[in-house]
């Protein structure tokens, strides 16, 4: 049974609903910012363990190449090839407020000064940078071909309503995965897990699993505990493969210890949500703003405390009409 999507599939969100032209700017997904809540720094135990391991095995940090990885004892051991599971190494965290670029719409040479880059899992990492691998882990990709593949290959992993119809994220026309039971979560991991393994083989430093908040669009078919349980499986798989893992949005999970090492957030300046992420992840936060107002607000309040960029909502490659990139 194949474990990868059909030919031509890509994981990258282009921030364009399925019924819109690929190069047409679209309105943001409607969001209701949750109330501010107290946070605790996730993955403290992981940080202590990996720091001790790095000190014992390497005796020093190997981050001197300035690739945006955190020092502080998280030495990056060389990954070696293997025929089965990838050789394990100590996950590296990104440095706080590292200059960043978000390249989900297509790879290109990063702007001058950028030290960390997020790209789709099928793209190649950038030499000498901290590379984050995007994976759509909680929802299927939009389009008939992707839905057909899931229906034919893993029909039990698509969430359905009481009438048997697929539960769809209407903004992006993406079917939700069914993570409502431990058995289903483990079955889905057999598909998504190899994608994470592929990120490690390709040389990425970290993984960004998207749609962590899919339960909020499930019409009651999922709850927060389901999302948290699958997130823990993804974090364990990433760490076993030597990858750090980033929390994507979802402020309501910040006070849960799910194993995340940093955060990738969208429009925390626009919705005044940056503070809890900064507190939880000690500045290891990459914020992508799509509106000038949100970008300017984030820069005024959080410059030097997290990484803030302005991108066009379609995250187009450099050189295409409509491409936008700024950082503060």
Image (spheres, helix red, strand yellow):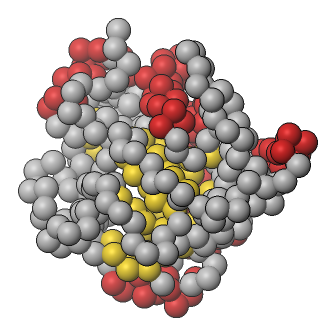
Q: Is residue 33 left or right of residue 130?
A: left
> In percent of the image, x 42 and y 88: which residue is there?
296
Q: Is residue 45 left or right of residue 309?
A: right
> In percent of the image, x 65 and y 69: which residue is there?
96
Q: Is residue 36 visible?
A: no
Q: Is residue 117 left or right of residue 151?
A: right
Q: Is residue 270 placed above or below 197 in the rendered structure?
A: below
Asked which quadrant contains residue 191, the reply is: top left
| Quarter of the image with the N terminus in it | top left
- Across the whole image, how many numbered discs are drawn on residues? 0
> In percent of the image, x 33 and y 75: which residue is there?
325
Q: Is residue 98 visible?
A: yes
The spot of residue 166 in percent (x, y) is: 25, 29
Nearer to me, 93 or 226: 93
Q: Is residue 278 placed above or below 71 in the rendered structure?
A: below
Furthest-bottom residue in this view: 300
Nearer to me, 8 or 149: 8
Nearer to me, 193 or 88: 88
Q: Is residue 26 placed above or below 158 in the rendered structure?
A: below
The spot of residue 85 in percent (x, y) is: 60, 20
Q: Is residue 54 placed above or below 14 in the rendered structure?
A: above
The spot of residue 153 in percent (x, y) is: 29, 14
Asked which quadrant contains residue 151, the reply is: top left
> In percent of the image, x 14 and y 32: which residue is there?
144
Nearer to me, 19 or 234: 234
Furthest-top residue in this view: 1
The spot of residue 320 in percent (x, y) is: 17, 67
């Amino acid at each position: 049974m194949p474990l990868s999507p059909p030919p031509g599939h890509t994981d990258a969100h282009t921030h364009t609903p399925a019924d819109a032209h690929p190069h047409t700017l679209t309105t943001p997904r409607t969001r209701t910012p949750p109330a501010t809540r107290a946070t605790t720094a996730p993955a403290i135990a992981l940080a202590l363990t990996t720091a001790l391991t790095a000190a014992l095995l390497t005796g020093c940090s190997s981050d001197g190449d300035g690739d945006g990885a955190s020092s502080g004892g998280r030495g990056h051991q060389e990954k070696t090839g293997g025929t089965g599971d990838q050789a394990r190494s100590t996950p590296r965290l990104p440095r706080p407020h590292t200059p960043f670029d978000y390249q989900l719409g297509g790879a290109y040479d990063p702007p001058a000064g950028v030290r960390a880059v997020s790209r789709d899992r099928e793209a190649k990492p950038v030499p000498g940078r901290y590379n984050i691998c995007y994976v759509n882990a909680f929802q299927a990709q939009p389009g008939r071909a992707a839905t057909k593949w899931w229906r034919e290959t893993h029909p039990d992993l698509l969430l359905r309503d009481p009438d048997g119809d697929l539960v769809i994220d209407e903004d992006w026309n993406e079917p939700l995965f069914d993570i409502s039971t431990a058995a289903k979560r483990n079955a889905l991991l057999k598909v998504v897990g190899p994608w994470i393994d592929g990120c490690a083989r390709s040389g990425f430093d970290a993984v960004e699993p998207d749609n962590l908040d899919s339960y909020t669009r499930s019409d009651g078919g999922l709850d927060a505990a389901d999302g948290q349980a699958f997130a823990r499986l993804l974090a364990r798989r990433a760490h076993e493969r030597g990858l750090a893992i980033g929390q994507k949005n979802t402020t309501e999970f910040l006070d849960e210890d799910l194993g995340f090492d940093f955060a990738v957030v969208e429009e925390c300046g626009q919705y005044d949500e940056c503070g809890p992420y900064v507190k939880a992840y000690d500045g290891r936060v990459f914020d992508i703003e799509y509106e000038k107002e949100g970008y300017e607000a984030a820069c005024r309040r959080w410059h030097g405390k997290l990484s803030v960029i302005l991108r066009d909502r379609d995250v187009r490659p450099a050189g295409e009409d409509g491409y936008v990139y700024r950082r503060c």
